[in-house]
Amino acid sequence: MRDILILAWFLQCLTISLAQLWPKEIRKCHFGDSECLVNTANAIIRNFPRGIPAIGLKPIDVVDLKDFKYWNDEKIGAFWLIFDLYQQVNYGFENTTITNIKGFGKNPTLSYMEIHGHIPSVIHKGKYMSQGRTWLVEMNSTGEYQSEFQSFNFTLKMKVFMEYRNHKRYLKMYELVPRVSLNRWIFWLDNFFPDNSDLTWAINQVFNSNWIEFWNELEPVNLKIFAGVFRDLIADIFNNIAYDDMFLPDETETELKI
């Protein structure tokens, strides 16, 4: 009996301490209060660009990305390309403005949860490795690249399920679908043709002069990258903080406790 009481006391203390992880300076909202949620989200972005480790919010001023196979053709035929990205970082998320939030109700599993936002400029830097063939031209290069997405608008649609820990509800994300629109995509590869700087400059000019066509072709790949970035930023918060602890208690619950 004594061991059971000690365990119960420990779990109670753990539950209280987890609830206190939510910073006091961050305003809580009632379930489904979209206007309040938007204001709170924007306040967090403005005041905590380097993250809040206690609740699982990672830094957003510099966002690391995993290595990614951007293009991975079979090595056959007159044209094929392998293009790998690594040592990647994103800049600009600290300038995000959240414009709308939906679906964060008492039971978020009933519908999609949505987050809408705008970022003036997302800058994506890293290194690349490429191999390929274009007709008679063989390519084999490594170098640095920079990509900028100007006036970046996004919508995140998420589906979640509940996981119960210590008698509290935590969210687990099993689907995240991003939608993106932008005004301009600027992309630059250094050293793409190591022995011909003029050809490197020319291929970059072709890309940037026809960026819309390239965006339409590469949008599915870009969306996979963006989905991974947003998933990493959100999933740890859901894992660290119980869903109910993110919100003010319902009035009906307060009345019952009284």
Image (cartoon, rainbow, N blue to C red):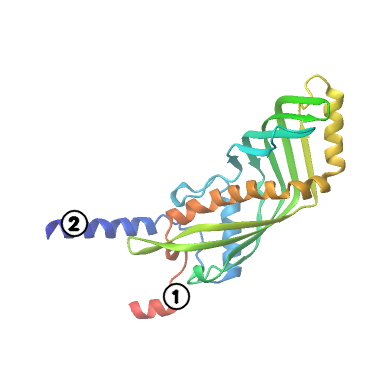
For the question of whether residue 219 can be seen, the reply is yes
Using the image, determine if residue 161 lies above or below residue 132.
below
Return the residue at label 2.
6
- Asked where in the image residue 167 lies, by quadrant, the reply is bottom left
In the image, what residue type sits under mark 2? Answer: Ile
Q: Quadrant of the N terminus?
A: bottom left
Seen in the image, is 103 located left or right of residue 246? right
Return the residue at label 1.
250
Seen in the image, is 5 located left or right of residue 213? left
Q: Quadrant of the C terminus?
A: bottom left
In the image, what residue type sits under mark 1? Answer: Asp
For the question of whether residue 30 can be seen, the reply is no
The residue that appears at 27% across and 58% down in the rendered structure is 11
The residue that appears at 17% across and 59% down in the rendered structure is 4
Residue 160 image offset from top left, x and y in percent: 50, 62
Residue 235 image offset from top left, x and y in percent: 50, 53
What SS does tag 2 mark?
helix
